Image (cartoon, rainbow, N blue to C red):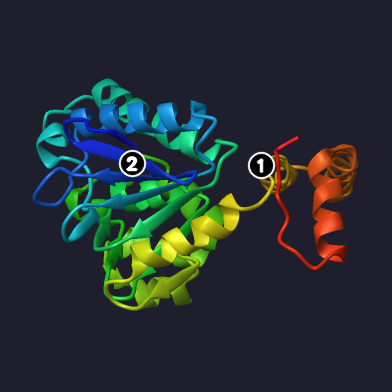
């Protein structure tokens, strides 16, 4: 197990699974220190060949309860406001564009920039009692870390309008019905469920995982028949790998495959 501790964000690595914990009491608000620590952890884990899946969660009763209001308070020009958002947007884009899967384990309050962080992850699980929302409208502003753009793309314009224009909170269970999260979990079990999912993903071929993520993320932006061609090309490349041969052999021999990422 590896352990890297930082001021407001730390991570552990075990059996190819990394867990990033945001730890800025009492509610894990995102200030510039937290964001820098998050960037450091994210980049280190993406670059670490031993890491296959990355989980993000929060310490205590919150995942992330939003941006630091005191930092927003002093943004009083359009230039300052726009520039203030660049760092967070960059970090979230790094997560979304990573070739390793990120899983958000939403353990509690997941609001504003916290929900935007979860939306940047590839998979989202939420405690059924978590509180989820984009309440920026109540402050006279709008989501600025990608919330207005990822929301309609991920779970539809109508739900995005409702969540963003009202600023209301919904439960993790309601977030499941809105398709904001993949699924809600029983109270207190979200990190355990995320780890079980991560174990299943970590057991697969890294080459196949990377190709699948490329097919989904890049193909989604293409014209459909162009995307099908892209899918065929990725499939074809995998047919030349040792992992493909091992996967087929293991299936026929009724055993678990031992992938070597080659």
Judging depth in this view, the residue of 201 and 126 nearest the camera is 201
The 10 Å Cα crowd at callout 1, few under 14, some 14 to 19, many 20 or more, is: many
In percent of width and height, residue 47 lies at: 50, 26
**Residue indicated by mark 1:** 206
Residue 68: mark: none
Q: Assess whether mark 1 and mark 2 are in contact (beta carbons under 8 angstroms).
A: no
SS label for mark 1:
helix
The structure residue drawn at horizontal position 14% and vertical position 52%, both measured from the top left corner, is: 27
The structure residue drawn at horizontal position 40% and vertical position 54%, both measured from the top left corner, is: 104
**Residue indicated by mark 2:** 12
Quarter of the image with the C terminus in it: top right
Q: CA distance from mark 2 to mark 1?
A: 20 Å
Name the side, left or right, on which 206 lies relative to 250.
Answer: left
In percent of width and height, residue 70 lies at: 9, 36
In percent of width and height, residue 152 lies at: 52, 56
| Residue 160 in view in this figure | no
The structure residue drawn at horizontal position 47% and vertical position 55%, both measured from the top left corner, is: 151
**2 or 1: tag closer to the N-terminus:** 2
| Residue 120 in view in this figure | yes
Name the side, left or right, on which 206 lies relative to 60.
Answer: right
Quarter of the image with the N terminus in it: top left
SS label for mark 2:
strand
In percent of width and height, residue 67 lies at: 21, 42
The structure residue drawn at horizontal position 21% and vertical position 48%, both measured from the top left corner, is: 140
Q: Is residue 125 above or below residue 215?
A: below
**In which image quadrant can residue 144 be found?**
top left
């Amino acid at each position: 197990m590896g352990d890297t501790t930082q001021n407001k964000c730390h991570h552990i690595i075990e059996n190819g699974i990394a867990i990033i914990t945001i730890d800025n009491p009492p509610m894990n608000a995102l200030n510039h220190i937290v964001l820098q620590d998050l960037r450091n952890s994210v980049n280190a884990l993406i670059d670490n060949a031993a890491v296959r899946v990355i989980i993000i969660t929060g310490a205590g009763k919150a995942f992330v309860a939003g941006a630091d209001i005191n930092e927003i308070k002093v943004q009083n020009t359009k230039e300052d406001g726009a520039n203030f958002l660049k760092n967070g947007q960059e970090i979230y884009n790094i997560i979304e564009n990573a070739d390793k899967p990120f899983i958000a384990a939403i353990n509690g309050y997941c609001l504003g920039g916290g929900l935007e962080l979860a939306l940047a992850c590839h998979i989202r699980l939420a405690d059924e009692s978590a509180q989820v929302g984009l309440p920026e409208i109540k402050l006279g502003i709008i989501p600025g870390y990608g919330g207005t753009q990822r929301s309609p793309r991920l779970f539809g314009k109508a739900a995005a309008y409702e969540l963003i224009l009202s600023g209301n909170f919904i439960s993790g269970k309601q977030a499941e019905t809105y398709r904001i999260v993949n699924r809600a979990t029983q109270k207190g079990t979200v990190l355990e469920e995320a780890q079980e999912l991560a174990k299943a993903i970590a057991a697969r071929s890294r080459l196949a995982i990377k190709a699948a993520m490329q097919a989904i993320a890049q193909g989604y932006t293409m014209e459909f028949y162009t995307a099908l061609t892209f899918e065929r090309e990725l499939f074809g490349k995998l047919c030349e790998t040792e992992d493909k041969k091992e996967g087929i052999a293991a299936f026929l021999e009724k055993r678990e495959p031992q992938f070597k990422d080659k």
